[in-house]
Image: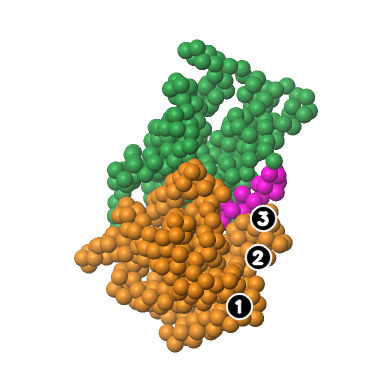
């Protein structure tokens, strides 16, 4: 039981990490907590599921589903994420935090309903990719390869990829420079507006990728966006907003905590992530891995 | 000031006579006033630049306190149940406030959300005590010792609520002008300077949090009585989001704002339920964006007009 819970936790943690790291990245660079982040997850999941279902309906080989998941995530990130940034967020940079929160909250409400209109309210099943990969045996327990190997693998790839991207590539360094000091970076010839847009698209795509991966493992119903948002915020806040490696640790922690709860106290599985977040924040108000912020008079 | 009083009096007078001509509106207006009270609580926090996405907690806590009391026949009297529900929320706010006033901005908003969601899931999962998702029925209590029929009860509740709202609005207006209220605005503009003045921002915010919890509790207690039924939905984050929406819609420039916003919200919800039942949240979202980008002072700002605007600019942010 405990082993099964641990495996579940690993799979679940990987998923939440993808969403939370996107949230964290956007906050780290743009300084905005994107409440609409959960919607990117949900829309990514729906688009991916629709793509996978279309592939099986057309009789195409199942392995095509995997590139479809990636394409769905990128499409949602670029189209929906890009649109939100250009049309709305651009106008509120540097304004009051409350205002930014409320703008993304409004986007969230709009996207939730838009998704109901486009995809309907009936549940979606698209578990073909998961079945296709089969199962593996771990200490006598059969578990799907998809959840045990593919999902953690994608999460690890994203973690390493982001680290490499931010530290070694010139565009990644430009992002870090803008994070540190937007004015100085602009003076050095960095196009801050472009950095913001691309960061937001990357963050949104990561959330959509989380959704796309999740679409094979569960049935999709309206409301998954809200649940995921709060969970990924719990992860990002537990880690300290803007911390990428910390998000991985916190995601595992909360993923494990939640799946242990599912097996041993199923009534309270919803409660656990909030409890973990509350406990961590009570001890370390800025999160586990945060650095001290300078205060300006 | 005179302008505000005239405007407030006009609003009250219009509200007071409305149910006499159209009895169907009594409950709707009472609900609007209750949500206005919760939004007034949100507005107090917004003055400090803090937003809570979890005030459904206090709304629901008070409502359930009233439901349990009424079911246990402890207090079968509305005039006892309302203050007791309010006190229960005040007590809860006093405890929760100890923790949340250490946080600002997003942490403040989301910690409130997390706590309210913990309460929400407890309400849903502890079926044997709370009745789960079906909620609990609230038997109709007496009013000042008198057993009313349904319509008279609704009308009496409405007028009592109206009076309570006026008292609450006057109290909050007075509070915002007091040193504590002024310090609240200083938290928004520059907290560190406030500390240099020897004022503890935490204490200031704690006071405001307590007040906002009490206001939400008052609204929750009345809504439990007037709807005769409480459900976990009262603590759900969407409900808390509505309070924020109402406060922004009405504007935080004056205490009449949240009530104006609440009335407008009921109208929008009524129309949206008819014309866009599937997408009325999207309608709200679009309106929220329009208000933020084109009328940042809210409805109150529009009604109060240029005079109010000039005054605010003069006073600085």
Q: Residues within 10 Å of mark 1 (few under 14, many from 20)?
A: some
Question: How far, Cα to Cα, is label 2 from label 1?
Answer: 17 Å
At a point 22% along the width and 67% down the height, the residue shown is: B197
Q: Residues within 10 Å of mark 2 (few under 14, many from 20)?
A: some
Q: Looking at the image, is A277 positioned above or below residue B236?
A: above
Question: How far, Cα to Cα, is label 3 from label 2?
Answer: 13 Å
Check disc 1 and report the residue beneath it. B19
The quarter in which the C terminus of chain A is drawn is bottom left
Q: Looking at the image, is B261 positioned above or below residue B284?
A: below
Counting residues from the N terminus, which is met first, the one under dot 3 or under dot 2? 2
Check disc 3 and report the residue beneath it. B279
Is residue A19 visible from the viewing direction of this image? Answer: yes
Question: How far, Cα to Cα, is label 3 from label 1?
Answer: 30 Å
Task: Give the colour chain A carries in the figure.
Answer: green
Could you tell me which chain the residue with mark 2 belongs to? B
Q: Is residue B17 magenta?
A: no
Q: Position of residue B190 (x, y in %)?
A: 32, 63
Corner quadrant of residue A143: top right
Residue B270: give its label.
Answer: 2
Frontmost of labels 3 and 2 is 2
Residues under numbered marks 2 and 1 in contact, where contact means CB atoms less than 8 Å apart: no
At a point 72% along the width and 61% down the height, the residue shown is: B275
Q: Is residue A109 magenta?
A: yes
């Amino acid at each position: 039981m405990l082993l099964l819970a641990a495996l579940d936790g690993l799979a679940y943690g990987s998923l939440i990490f993808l969403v939370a790291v996107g949230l964290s990245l956007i906050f780290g660079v743009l300084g905005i907590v994107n409440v609409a982040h959960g919607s990117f997850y949900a829309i990514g999941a729906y688009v991916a599921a629709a793509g996978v279902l279309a592939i099986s309906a057309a009789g195409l080989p199942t392995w095509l589903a995997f590139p479809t998941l990636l394409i769905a995530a990128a499409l949602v990130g670029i189209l929906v994420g890009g649109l939100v940034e250009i049309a709305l967020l651009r106008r509120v940079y540097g304004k009051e935090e409350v205002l930014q929160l409320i703008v993304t909250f409004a986007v969230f409400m709009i996207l939730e309903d838009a998704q109901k209109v486009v995809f309907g309210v009936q549940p979606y099943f698209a578990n073909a990719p998961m079945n296709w990969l089969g199962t593996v045996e771990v200490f006598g327990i059969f578990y799907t390869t998809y959840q045990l190997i593919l999902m953690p693998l994608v999460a690890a790839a994203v973690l390493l990829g982001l680290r490499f991207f931010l530290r070694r590539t010139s565009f990644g360094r430009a992002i870090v420079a803008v994070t540190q000091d937007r004015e100085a970076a602009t003076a050095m010839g960095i196009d801050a507006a472009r950095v913001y847009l691309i960061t937001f698209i990357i963050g949104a795509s990561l959330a959509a990728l989380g959704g796309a991966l999740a679409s094979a493992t569960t049935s999709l119903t309206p409301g998954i966006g809200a649940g995921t948002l709060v969970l990924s915020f719990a992860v990002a806040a537990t880690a300290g907003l803007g911390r990428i490696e910390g998000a991985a640790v916190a995601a595992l922690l909360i993923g494990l905590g939640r799946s242990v709860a599912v097996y041993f106290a199923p009534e309270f599985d919803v409660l656990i992530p909030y409890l973990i977040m509350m406990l961590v924040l009570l001890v370390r108000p800025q999160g586990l891995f945060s650095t001290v912020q300078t205060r300006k008079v | 000031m005179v302008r505000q009083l005239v405007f407030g009096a006009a609003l009250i007078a219009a509200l007071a006579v409305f149910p006499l001509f159209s009895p169907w509106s009594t409950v709707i207006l009472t609900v609007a006033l209750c949500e206005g009270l919760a939004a007034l609580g949100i507005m107090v926090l917004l003055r400090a630049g803090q937003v809570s996405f979890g005030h459904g907690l206090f709304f629901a806590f008070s409502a359930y306190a009233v439901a349990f009391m009424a079911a246990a026949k402890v207090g079968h009297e509305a005039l006892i149940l309302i203050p007791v529900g309010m006190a229960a929320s005040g007590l809860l706010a006093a405890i929760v406030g100890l923790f949340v006033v250490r946080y600002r901005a997003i942490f403040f908003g989301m910690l409130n959300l997390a706590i309210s969601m913990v309460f929400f899931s407890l309400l849903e999962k502890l079926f044997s005590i709370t009745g789960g998702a079906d909620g609990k029925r609230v038997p109709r209590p007496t009013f000042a010792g008198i057993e009313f029929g349904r319509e008279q009860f609704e009308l009496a509740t409405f007028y009592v609520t109206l009076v309570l709202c006026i008292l609450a609005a006057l109290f909050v207006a007075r509070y915002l002008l007091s040193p504590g209220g002024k310090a609240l605005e200083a938290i928004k503009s520059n907290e560190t300077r406030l500390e240099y003045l020897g004022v503890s921002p935490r204490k200031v915010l704690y006071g405001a949090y307590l007040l906002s919890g009490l206001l939400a509790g008052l609204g929750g207690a009345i809504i439990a009585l007037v709807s005769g039924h409480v459900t976990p939905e009262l603590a759900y984050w969407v409900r808390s989001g509505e309070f924020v929406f109402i406060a922004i819609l009405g504007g935080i420039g004056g205490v009449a704002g949240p009530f104006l916003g609440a009335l407008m919200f009921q109208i929008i919800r009524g129309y949206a339920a008819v014309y866009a039942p599937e997408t009325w949240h999207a309608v709200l979202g679009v309106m929220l964006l329009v208000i933020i980008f084109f009328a940042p002072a809210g409805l109150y700002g529009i009604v109060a007009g240029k005079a109010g605007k000039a005054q605010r600019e003069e006073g600085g942010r």
